[in-house]
Amino acid sequence: MVVKRIFILAGEASGDVLGAELVRALRRIQPQLHIDAWGGTELSRALNKPVLRNLDQLAFMGFWDVFRNAGAVRANFAAARAVLSEPWDLVVLIDYPGFNLRLAKWMATRPWRSQRRVVQLVAPSVWAWKEGRVQILKQAYDAVIPLLPFEPEFLAKRGVNAPFFGHPALDRFAPGSATESGVLVLAPGSRKAELQRLAPVFAATAARLGMKPRWIRPSSWTEGAYRAMLREALQAEPHGELAEGMASARGARAALVASGTATLELALLKVPMVVAYKVDALSFALAKRLVKVKYVSLVNLVLGREAVNERLQNQCAPEVLAQDLSELMADGPLRSMMLADFEQFAAALGEGGAMDRTASYLLQE
């Protein structure tokens, strides 16, 4: 199938970055492609035009957050069906599994489905919970492209077409090291609900340590919007500086970070970290019953051990986090071991050029 028209759907900030990287890689091969997308600032920049639907209408997470925004979720699904009914040659759904799996199942029932390829970039965590979703991956997608090294074998054994090209984050930061800054980085996530839960805890942790932090602002938010959300979450003006993108963490002494792609990026930047996360009580109770893995951070999942501390729910508290960070910021075996673990982690992710290989695969006839 000759690919001329592509639709990309990214429902959260990490997917927005991946989508932008994919657009640039696709156009390096075939500059005249027609591409439209749902996503955020990064995708809009890569496309050099506005996205059709923005992240602020999409990024809901956790049972309670989705439930409270059920009307918006239904409206998004109806809008997605309308867009996907147009004649696309290739549809790339990025991460955002609750929504994208539902879309893929719907597309599988359409008469035009055989005239297009549907691909999922970033495999849903079926190895962690809801393994039954493997059947959707097998039946509703032409391919699922995983980014973590242990996923291809798991998926292939269950009949999913899961080619592995490495992790695009390996190309995300310019090579080289930065001068040690002594800064404490705070990265409480990209969704409003995450900021509301985590920003007060992160700010209180920095205050306990007597440090003015560097808040990492995802590029999907303007500085004004991010500052306003922090102000709302903290009920005060945020102390410290705001910096855009995880590249701004290079050279930091340590980081306090929400679970997610940011943990992977900090490991590649060799910034020692503590991972912290909270969700609503109902979502956590459901997760405890369903999740089959020990860890939540990508570093620990890939290495198969607790290389970085994970502080969840009640342990996500300023007194606990400040103690962890204090120990990590001191020179000694704990810090040295974590930095060595990051070297092993980066080696496990594969080689650079992953998105170029992915784009070549997607455009093959």
Image (cartoon, grey):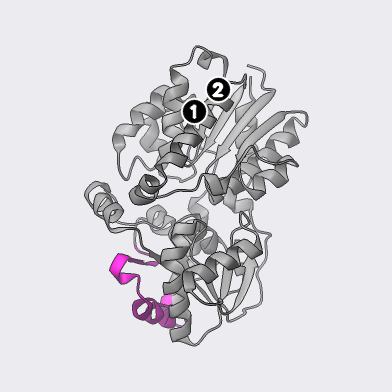
Which residues fall within the magenta stretch?
306-334
Residue at 55% x, 49% y: name it.
Answer: 56
Mark 1, residue position = 143
**Residue 310 is covered by the magenta coloring:** yes
Residue type, label 1: Ala
Whether residue 44 sits left or right of residue 17 in the image: it is right
**Badge 2 density bin: few <14, some 14–19, many ≥20, Cα 10 Å:** some
Of 231 and 216, which appears nearest the observer?
231
Residue at 49% x, 29% y: name it.
Answer: 78
**Residue 135 is covered by the magenta coloring:** no
Residue at 51% x, 68% y: name it.
Answer: 232
Residue type, label 2: Arg
Q: Position of residue 4 (x, y in %)?
A: 70, 23
Residue at 43% x, 85% y: name it.
Answer: 208
Whether residue 144 sits left or right of residue 248 in the image: it is left
- Residue 167 visible? The answer is no
Q: Earlier in the sequence, mark 2 or mark 1?
A: 2
Q: Position of residue 159 (x, y in %)?
A: 37, 26
Residue lying at the far front in this picture: please name it.
71
Q: Position of residue 331 (x, y in %)?
A: 48, 83
The quadrant of the rendering that contains the C terminus is: top right
